[in-house]
Amino acid sequence: MLPEIDSYLSANAARFEDELCELLRIPSVSADSTRKGEVRRAAEWVAAQFRGLGLEVELCETAGHPIVFAEAKADPSKPTVLVYGHYDVQPPDPLDLWTTPPFEPTRRDGNIVARGATDDKGQMFTHVKSAEAWLKGTKGKLPVNLKFLIEGEEEVGSAHLDQFIEANKTKLKADVVVISDTSQFGPGRPAITYGLRGIAYYELKLQGPSRDLHSGTFGGGVMNPANALARVLATIIDERGRIQVPGFYDDVQPLTDLERQQFAALPFDEAQFMKAIGLTAVAGEEGFTTLERRWARPTFDINGLTSGYQGEGAKTVLPAKASAKFSFRLVPKQDPEKIRVALEAHLRRVLPSGVTMELTAFHGAPGVVVPLESPFVAAAVTAVESGFGRKPVFIREGGSIPVVSTFHELLGLDTLLLGWGLDDDNTHSPNEKFCLADFHRGIKASAYLWHEIGKKF
Amino acid sequence: MLPEIDSYLSANAARFEDELCELLRIPSVSADSTRKGEVRRAAEWVAAQFRGLGLEVELCETAGHPIVFAEAKADPSKPTVLVYGHYDVQPPDPLDLWTTPPFEPTRRDGNIVARGATDDKGQMFTHVKSAEAWLKGTKGKLPVNLKFLIEGEEEVGSAHLDQFIEANKTKLKADVVVISDTSQFGPGRPAITYGLRGIAYYELKLQGPSRDLHSGTFGGGVMNPANALARVLATIIDERGRIQVPGFYDDVQPLTDLERQQFAALPFDEAQFMKAIGLTAVAGEEGFTTLERRWARPTFDINGLTSGYQGEGAKTVLPAKASAKFSFRLVPKQDPEKIRVALEAHLRRVLPSGVTMELTAFHGAPGVVVPLESPFVAAAVTAVESGFGRKPVFIREGGSIPVVSTFHELLGLDTLLLGWGLDDDNTHSPNEKFCLADFHRGIKASAYLWHEIGKKF
């Protein structure tokens, strides 16, 4: 029990929400080059928060969007925790499916609804407010040294982050990383995520004729790049959900019996899962359960398709171009670069003659598994239980946080993935939300985490 | 030789071009419901032209865009020619590929460049001006009775035309139909088109989850409708260009040896064809030449693809929806309704579980072959030679003019397809054009056609 902390959090809960809304109002869409200024505004807002707490703050320029670095030095004998988060958000499209505008945060049914509410502004902010609770609510006694690394390019592949970490190894020296950018197992069922999938994201552009043609005059005599695209994409995965790119599964480690048993023991309600996202049937790789498919098996998903006429009515065009954005989710040991080489060779092999292809690789990151034996994990278990009133379960997560492997490779650090979100938070979708009760539980769990980590060393 | 006609055409050539530009400036895009008013404005402009010539004119309302009907009664003992054309145009997308704005007609390299220049405003207008030459240049002596049926829904499937023809059989009574909405065989090589392909156009919409999902959190456990779309579309046609919908070829008549010989004898330059549209290789159904594939074999072309994120950069979305517009070109004897039934059954059979489908059939029309023995064909041969200075060749055309089969079925009329366009006119593409010399040759050929038909009866 930390009564000073508890009472500070209660007394300031409403203000914390208002401050989060301020941040959510900034449309910091990193993928949209027309919003560069807004992205910077979000960085400055975050920096101002840290400055208000008396931290040393730097707005670090990159070739892309800036990185906010802040540091609170408590006691050199205490461990140092590096908190990572991101202030940028996904594009809000399709706009017409939002009930309220994406950048006008709205309280509804106990949630705050806005782009970035959970991914990651809301979750990231819990650690800022927990630091505040120690610094303002307890006469400045932070039980650990804290460093914050809050970037603005997570949603576009963190293009300049590795370079920044590489160049600032001393500044970023720490004992453990904490990230809140994942989900609980379910409402009121907090979780520590010990495994993440990696990602390899591509855009494939096919060009047929040099201009759009009349499909009557030319159809049948010219390879249609949209036909070719469908054919090529269909070769990547088969009816049983197995990816057909030669060599794709070479480095995939089979799930252990223990993991499969643990997954099976989790109270996962498949009917509820289907209902929540409007499915009449689950689907996926033959021989695996839904949790295994989502957490621990690689995938192929088309993320976008574009070709020809997409307006109202019919247009008899034989399009000159067709393109697809698609990505593989990777599991630990799969190497994104090796996948790219295998993919490109496969695509060139199956590409019909009469079209040319251009494959662009966007961000890639390997999957990671975090060791459960670390004392930081034990500290997190206690802290999360304090914040949420329930012991966390250990889960994996299908998404990718490439920085987790970067921290491991470049700084030798393990990462505590403490997710305060929920699977139905509509991350990357219209009507993204974050449960306000979880926002406050997250702040409390974070405040207790500094205490638990400080106690242990 | 018709000296009065010839000199009237020469004296008024510049004005004819200016008037065509007026019509081309009206963005009468029938597929775009926001341009309903502009479509009507084009109809009114055409009606005013006829009124100016002293014809009886009606602007006939339909449930869609209006039909312009005009009649010039010359002599009841003379044959009656029904001229069909359309004043609506294709959407101008993609706008960024136009060198000059699509609705600001521009003279360039001997062409007039604008949406609708050749399809069909420019070609249709030749018959208006040829009527004018007889009515104004020869003291009103039209050698035939003329009826004009100019519609505004050709580019969206002529939804209300059949109904209009059905309801106005007496009004439309004629001896032959004349349509200029096709192409010459090549520059300076006029042609009479005796065969047209039909069309069956569809939109397929697939729905997976009820909303867009994060491809990390959900990928692998949910059927992605864009993956499903690629797979389903890829089943429709195989690597050898053969359509795989069961029963699709049941009614396809094989090409006769004579036709294949005639096609092979035409001076078709495949290297030039490829160069003109930027191809490195032709493609299509195995066992057929490029002309056979384009004129006389059925096809499958995807006309549009839409799914997920299509903006700049990467978005890790598992889209809720994916859709395609696609069409088959049909050859004579294939029945669009039979094709629809076979297609829907095929799609339902190959559709993966976890997605639902909705198939919408847009316009459908069977292919047609026009008999070459008719005396009207002989008249057309002479008239085209007079206008173009060269005997026409007999060709087929890959496009569809559904109304040709409607005229045959409902009015018992054959159609003379006299195309003044060129294959590289960019119909349905950016930078649509019409050669101004061909515009004037077309007017002259049309004026001589009235004379030749009048002479024969």
Image: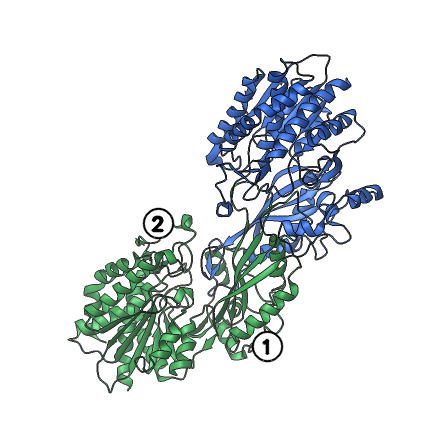
Chain colours: A blue, B green
Question: Residue B185: image x %, image y %?
Answer: 41, 68
Q: Residue at x 53, y 64 (%)?
A: A221
Compare residues B189 and B282 and report the one nearer the observer.
B282
Quadrant into which the N terminus of chain A falls: top right
What chain letter is assigned to the residue under label 1?
Answer: B
Classify residue A145 as left or right of residue A261.
Answer: left
Residue type pointed to by label 2: Thr
Kindly give the residue lying farthest to the left in the view shown. Answer: B139
Question: Residue A25: image x %, image y %?
Answer: 49, 33
Residue carrying label 2: B100
Placement of B94 over or under B332, stated as above or below: above
Classify residue A209 as left or right of residue B184.
Answer: right
Q: Residue at x 62, y 13 (%)?
A: A139
Which quadrant holds residue B284? bottom right
Residue carrying label 1: B250
Q: Secondary structure at mark 1?
A: loop
Which quadrant holds residue B150? bottom left
User: Marks 1 and 2, how far apart in space?
Assistant: 46 Å
Q: Nearer the viewer, mark 1 or mark 2?
A: 1
Question: Residue B39: image x %, image y %?
Answer: 32, 61
